[in-house]
Each structure stands twice: as C-alpha cells, then as structure tokens.
Image (cartoon, rainbow, N blue to C red):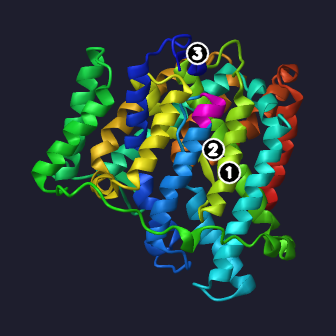
Amino acid sequence: MDRFFKITERGSTLFRECLAGLVTFMSMAYIVCVQPQIMSGAMFNVTTGADAAALVTTTCLVAAIGCVLMGLWANYPLGLAPGMGENIFVVLTVFPACVALVGQNGNTEAWSLALGVVLISGVLFALLSFMNLRKYLVEAISPGLRGGMSAGIGLFIALIGLQHAEVIVCKNNLYVLGSLAEPAPFVFLVGLIVTASLHTLNIRGSILYGIIASAITALCFGKIVPVYPLGLPADPSPVVAQMNILGVFYYLHELLPFLLILVFMELFDTLGTVIGIGTRAGLIKDNQFPDIEKVFAVDATATVIGAVGGHSTVTAYVESVTGVETGGRTGLTALVTGVCFLLAMFCSPCILMIANYRPITSSALVIVGALMLQSATKIDWNDFSESIPAFLLMIGIPLSYNIADGLILGFLVYPIIKIFSGKGKQVRWILYALTIVLILYVAFLKS
C-alpha cells in the first residue's frame, strides 16, 4: 500500500491519510443532504420529477465512485461529488429551458433532457482531458496566478464557513454581522477555538477534533438530536439512467449554449480547485503538476457517471483542502473518503444529523481558508502585470461567489496587461487562445 500510494515518498503516514480522508468526508457530507433537495427542486419550490429519496442514495454512490477513482487512478487527495453551482445552474436554468422545449414543469421528459445535457458536457470535458489541453493550460499558469487562485478559494470557503455559522448574514444584498448571541455562532466559535489551539500545538487531526467539539456543543443546545445511526438506503432505480441523449442532439441548436457553459464551469471549477489544493499540499514542483491529466480525466469520467445517477456535474471539492491540512497527500485520502460515502448510505440518519446543522463544520472551513491565504505570498506584488490579475482572481472568487467566474475575471486581463506592459512573450500561446475564447464566452453566452 505504501508503494502503490507513495505514502512515505510524499511525507505522510497510513494513519494520517485515513484521518485526512475522514476529515474530508465530514467537510463534504453536507452534499448528501443538499444535493437531493436541489435536484428534486424542493429547495426552490420546483418539481423536476426526480425522487429525493433515490437521489440521497445516488449522491453517495456517485461521490464514492468519483473519490475511489481519484484515489486509485490519479493518486491525489481530492474528494469528488456533485458540484455546488453547477447543480443550481442545471435546475434553475437548464431544466426550465428543457421544459420550454418538451413540456410543463415536473415533466420527467424535460428532466431527462436536462440530464442528457449534463452527460454530453461531461463527454466533451473528457475529450479535453484526453487531448491534454488542460495539462498545457495548467503549466502555462504563472506561480503568481496560482497563488491568487489558492488565496481566493481560501477567502471563498472562509466566507461560506462564516455564513454557515450565521456569523455573516446577507441582508438586502449586503453581508452584515449576524447576532452572536445565537447558538450557531457559539457552536462555530467552540470548534474554531479547539481547532486553532490544537493546530498551534501541532496536533494532527485538529480539524476533526474541532468538528467533534462543535457537534457536542450543538447537542447541548438541542440543535441536533441523537438518532439510531443505521438505516437501509432508498431504491436508486427511479433516477438511474434517465438521461435523454438523443433529445439533446434533436434540440442541439437551442441547448448548445448550456452545453458550453457547463463545460466552462467544470473546466474552471476543477482548474481552480486542483491548483489551489495542489499548491497548498506542495504537489506542484518546478511549475509541474505530475499526472494532472489523470485528475482531469477522473473528474470528467465522474461527471458522466453522475449524469447516469441522475445528478449534475461531478467535480473536485474545494473542501478537500481540510484533508490536506490534516496531512493527506495521496490517493488513500480520497479512497477513505469514498468508503465513507458508501457507508453513509447505511448511516444516513447519523450523517444527516450532523450535516443538516452546518455550524458544526463551519469552523473547519474558516480555519482552512486562513491557511490557504498564505499562498498570496507567492504573488510578486511589485510586478503589476502579475499582481493585478492575481488580485482580481483573489477577490473575484469570493465576491462573485463562484470559482469559475473569479478565474474568468483574472484570466481575461492577464494576457492583455502583459501585452501592454511589454511582457507579452512571457505568456504562452494557450493563454492567448483562452482569452479569445473567454471574450466570446462573456459576450455571447455568459448572459
């Protein structure tokens, strides 16, 4: 196992990898609750026709398959699951368009067509992976931009954590300080203090211990109630293999923009997550990310599998960085996370108990966000042709509340500033080509 996963070679241990996999799962477990609510339409008072109980089972299955593939094939500590952002886009944008084409709201034919769009976008994404275009793109990104990505993602997940803890709330489209007298902020603060203190003392597993402390505090406040932890998973068959592929080609002219947008969203979400976490884990050396094409191929394959399971785009999760901070450096971390998702099907009452009360895991996100911000030191702040695009990346990700949109903002201006500052030769051709594509995307598809 040590030779296969290169555990010693990457400076880790078996215990550390297993602990990191558990922490990654705890940080991602909320998707088991959220994804069925979104994809069934219940969160938005929309009826897609997808069965929520079946979606719980397939969420666990799809995430488990993605994580296991990442661990065994790519050997990186990245957890995969249906992505936040893409799922909302599918339900609120792609599905209504399909309804307009084939039927009324709630018509399963429209939902099958939307799943067909997701599957074909995954196939297109896979083609990009096997052509190694994304590998060249990663190698063309400067250390400053990578630092901006990692720091921006850190700010983004810290913002998510503060929102989950109700420390920061949105009122009238403005972020303001919430009421700190409520139980949620207190649960968050307990986890934060425990995690930060143990991390300062260099105690491994500090993030997991913080989550446990928060869970105990939530239990004392009555925010979670102990439940019998075991239960049989629901029948997944109502949502499996329901996609309509031929229908996508029949309506290709109308659905092509949605296909391209999903490919773009997955490309930039995965790119930002992989580079951000890879930078933090020290896996990128001499501007090279070994076997990154395998990471992208796993991501694309998981998206195709996800569509078969009735889900939106499957992607690498930024919450994986919690496992990296716990010490995870190899695919064994992802493998353990995948096993946890499989077990979650049979322990769903216990998982839902914790995941349904988001302040329990919010401290982990804030701590990790602070750690990822250290990557900003890799930006050459004296060179405006590097620092301004990196800064736009850094603030664009949290302010747009979307990794892909933040990356687009930075990548749009980077080659242009380089040209006008007389440093155009420092930019590789693939970034120039990407800039042209992004301009067309923003002008004709983004709206």
Nearer to me, 21 or 417: 21
Q: Dot 1 corresponds to which residue?
A: 265
Which of the marked residues, 3 or 2, is nearer the chain's N terminus?
3
Residue 157's x, y, as percent?
A: 45, 41
Q: Nearer the viewer, mark 3 or mark 2?
A: 3
Tell me the crowding category of disc 3: few under 14, some 14 to 19, or many 20 or more residues within 10 angstroms, Cα based.
few
Mark 1 secondary-structure assignment = helix
Q: Badge 1 local density, few (<14 within 10 Å), some, or many (20+)?
A: many
Q: Main secondary structure of the magenta part?
A: helix
Q: CA distance from mark 3 to mark 2?
A: 31 Å
Q: Is residue 321 visible?
A: yes
Label 3 – label 1 distance at C-alpha: 35 Å
* Identity, as a three-letter code, of the amino acid under mark 2: Asp
Q: Which residues are magenta?
A: 70-75
SS class, disc 2: helix
Q: Measured along the vertical axis of the image, is residue 437 above or below residue 370?
A: below
Q: Is 442 left, or right, of 184 in this rendering?
A: right
Q: Of marks 3 and 1, which one's residue comes earlier in the chain?
A: 3
Q: Are marks 2 and 1 in contact (CB under 8 Å)?
A: yes
Name which residue type carries label 3.
Arg
Residue 432, x across and y down, in percent: 86, 35
Q: Which residue ends up furthest to the bottom in the rendered image? A: 104
Task: Indicate which disc residue 269 carries.
Answer: 2
Q: Number of labelled discs?
A: 3
Residue pictured at 28% horizontal, 48% vertical: 359
Q: Quadrant of residue 138?
A: top right
Horizontal arrangement in the rendering, residue 19 relative to residue 409 (left or right): left
- Residue position for label 3: 3
